[in-house]
Image (spheres, rainbow, N blue to C red):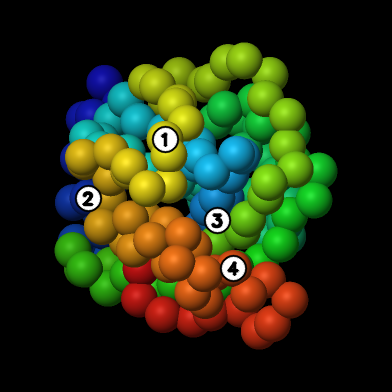
C-alpha cells in the first residue's frame, strides 16, 4: 500500500513540480552509521523526512529520528543543505549530525529495517546522495567541519 502511495506521489511531483524541504540526520557511533531501509522504496537511506508546518529544522530532525527509529538525540549539529533537481523535483534536504544519541529499540511502519554499517563498508543500494555525504564525512570533508560554515551542494 505504501509503495502505491509513493508512486502516486511521484505522479503528483511530475505534474506540480513542488518545492520540498526535508531533514536528514546522520547518526554515527564507533565508526558506524545507522541507515534505514524503507517499506515503500528500495535501498538504504540516512534517516529523515519532511518538515511539518510551524516546526523548526532542529525540531523536525529530532521528531523524524524518534518517529523512524526511536532515536533520542542529545547534541546535534548542522552539516549542510543539499538540493536535488532530479525526477522533476526541487527537493532540498538539511543534513544534521549526531554522535550523542540513544536508541529505543524499535521503528515505525515506514521502516522495514534499521542497521548500523561501518563507514568504510557502506551497503549496496545506498542512495547515491547519501553515499556521497557519508564518504565526505569519512574523509573529513566538508561534513566533519562542524564548527565552520555548513556545506551547500547537490544531494
Query: Looking at the picture, how far across and down is residue 64, in whole percent?
Result: 60, 40
Comparing 61 with 11, the one in front is 61
Q: Secondary structure at mark 3?
A: strand
- Whole-angstrom CA distance, mark 1 to mark 4, is 18 Å
1 or 4: tag closer to the N-terminus: 1
1 or 2: tag closer to the N-terminus: 2
Which residue is label 2 attached to?
Answer: 10
Q: Quadrant of the N terminus?
A: top left
C-beta proximity under 8 Å, tags 3 and 4: no
C-beta proximity under 8 Å, tags 1 and 2: no
Query: Looking at the picture, how far across and down is residue 47, in whole percent?
Result: 49, 42
3 or 2: tag closer to the N-terminus: 2
Decide if residue 51 is on the left or right side of residue 54.
left
Mark 3 or mark 4, whichever is nearer to me = 4
C-beta proximity under 8 Å, tags 3 and 1: no
Q: How many marks?
A: 4
In the rendered image, is residue 4 in sight? yes
4 or 2: tag closer to the N-terminus: 2
In the rendered image, is residue 53 in sight? no
- Whole-angstrom CA distance, mark 1 to mark 2, is 29 Å
Q: 72 above or below 94?
A: above
Could you tell me which residue is drawn at 33 percent across and 55 percent down? 131
Task: Decide: few, some or many residues near mark 3? Use Cα within 10 Å; few <14, some 14-19, many ≥20.
Answer: many
- Whole-angstrom CA distance, mark 3 to mark 2, is 19 Å
Could you tell me which residue is drawn at 28 percent across and 45 percent down? 126
**In the image, farthest residue toward the top:** 105
3 or 1: tag closer to the N-terminus: 3
The tag on residue 138 is none
The tag on residue 117 is 1
Could you tell me which residue is drawn at 21 percent across and 30 percent down? 4
Task: Decide: few, some or many residues near mark 1? Use Cα within 10 Å; few <14, some 14-19, many ≥20.
Answer: some
Q: Secondary structure at mark 2?
A: helix
Amino acid at each position: 500500500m505504501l509503495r502505491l502511495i509513493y508512486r502516486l506521489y511521484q505522479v503528483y511531483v511530475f505534474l506540480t513540480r513542488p518545492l520540498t524541504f526535508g531533514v536528514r540526520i546522520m547518526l554515527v557511533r564507533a565508526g558506524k552509521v545507522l541507515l534505514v531501509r524503507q517499506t515503500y522504496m528500495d535501498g538504504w537511506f540516512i534517516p529523515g523526512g519532511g518538515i511539518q508546518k510551524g516546526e523548526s529544522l532542529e525540531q523536525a530532525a529530532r521528531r523524524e529520528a524518534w518517529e523512524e527509529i526511536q532515536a533520542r538525540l542529545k547534541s546535534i549539529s548542522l552539516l549542510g543543505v543539499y538540493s536535488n533537481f532530479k525526477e522533476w523535483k526541487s527537493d532540498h534536504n538539511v543534513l544534521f549530525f549526531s554522535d550523542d544519541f540513544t536508541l529505543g529499540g524499535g521503528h515505525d511502519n515506514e521502516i522495514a529495517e534499521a542497521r548500523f554499517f561501518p563507514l568504510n563498508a557502506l551497503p549496496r543500494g545506498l542512495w547515491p546522495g547519501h553515499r556521497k555525504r557519508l564518504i565526505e564525512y569519512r574523509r573529513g570533508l566538508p561534513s566533519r567541519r562542524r564548527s565552520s560554515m555548513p556545506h551547500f551542494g547537490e544531494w
